Amino acid sequence: MAGDDKKQPIVKKKIVKGGGGHHGGSWKVAYADFVTAMMAFFLLLWLLGITDEMQREGISDWFNNPAGIKGPGGASTSMIKLGGTKDIPKGDGKKSEQQALTTEQQVEKSAQEKVKEIEKKEDKKRLDKLLEKLKAAIESSKELKNFKDQLLLEITPDGLRIQIIDKKNRPMFSLGKAKLKSYTKVILRKISKIIVQEVPNRVSISGHTDATPFPKGYIEYEDRYGNDFRKPYTNWELSADRANAARRELVKGGLPSNQLGRIVGLGSSVLLDKKKPRSPVNRRISILIMNKSAEESMLRVEGNVKAKAKAKVKIKAKVETKPKALAEQGAH
């Protein structure tokens, strides 16, 4: 029994601690991360190359506030306000407004500005051409040449202005009246024809008087029944009536009514010769062929005035409207 035990083979168990297969594939993960990072880097370079400064600022602003959360004070720079954190400055209002515009809006705005600039240049060319045409007509026309010293032409910031002024022995109107002299009618009609031929711009007409007060301060007239009446009348009314008289002659000369923009009487508020308020040159008719900027400004101002007037009418109507019961109580 003892001999048999000695001959029995001895078995040894050896545990091999490996894992070489796992370590053999780890470099692939690292390489994939590297390739991804390089791809992102080149993509970033490409994006920086195709965008302008304004677009890059817009992208930066989006990363500063991706959620676009807004509160009572405007857009927030962080989703959650944490103690000790600092808000990112937004810059001035103009920059934020530019960033808010999309590329398409920016292109459209730029195109509109270019169109306006082109229109402005074309408008100036037309008015310059009209000025030369009027000067040539004054020199060549017998009717106009005789009044050369009474026709003042100049380019102003609002357009081309033509002034027809009085002279001591050669007035444009009958004394103290809005009745045009026969030669004044000829001048206005010739000017009208040239304006119509050259420009489509709107026309503004203003009447002016000197500082001499209107005699008596009233006019007398008779109605159709033969009754005599007095009507308050000053240089304001006289200048407005003279402007309207000039308007009628311009229309007879061919100027379309829809090309007229404004008819005003300024009395003696805008003197041509301030040192001599009662000088005849202060009595004049001023015809302004407006440029596009002046025309747009006039329409914008008049539009706002009309809008405010309508608002006042509505408010007044609401105030005057009372419940029937209250109205009856007020009647007692």
Image: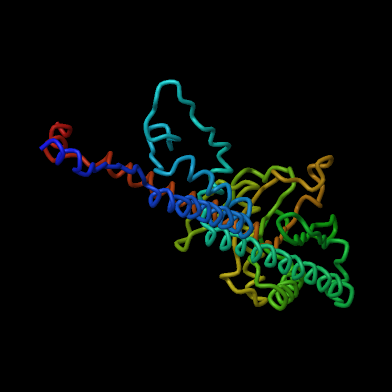
Query: Which residue is rendered at x = 57% and y = 36% of the image?
Result: 91
Res. 228 in view: no
243 relative to 184 in the view: left or right: left
Q: Where is residue 36 in the image (x, y as percent from the top left)?
A: 50, 55
Above or below, 43 relative to 211: below
Q: Residue furthest top?
A: 84
Which quadrant holds the C terminus? top left
Choose top left, top right, bottom left or bottom right for residue 251: bottom right
Viewer-side residue, 127 vs 219: 127
Q: Where is residue 84 in the image (x, y as percent from the top left)?
A: 45, 21
Query: Which residue is rendered at x = 72% and y = 58% of the image?
Result: 286
Res. 169 in view: yes
Query: Which residue is rendered at x = 48% and y = 59% of the image?
Result: 223
Viewer-side residue, 14 vs 171: 14
Q: Position of residue 99 (x, y in %)?
A: 54, 48
Which quadrant holds the N terminus? top left
278 relative to 263 in the view: left or right: right
Q: Position of residue 133 (x, y in %)?
A: 82, 74
Query: Which residue is rendered at x = 63% and y = 51% of the image?
Result: 53
Viewer-side residue, 97 vs 20: 20
- Which colouring convention does the figure follow? rainbow
**For the image shown, how many numbered marks are present on the structure?**
0
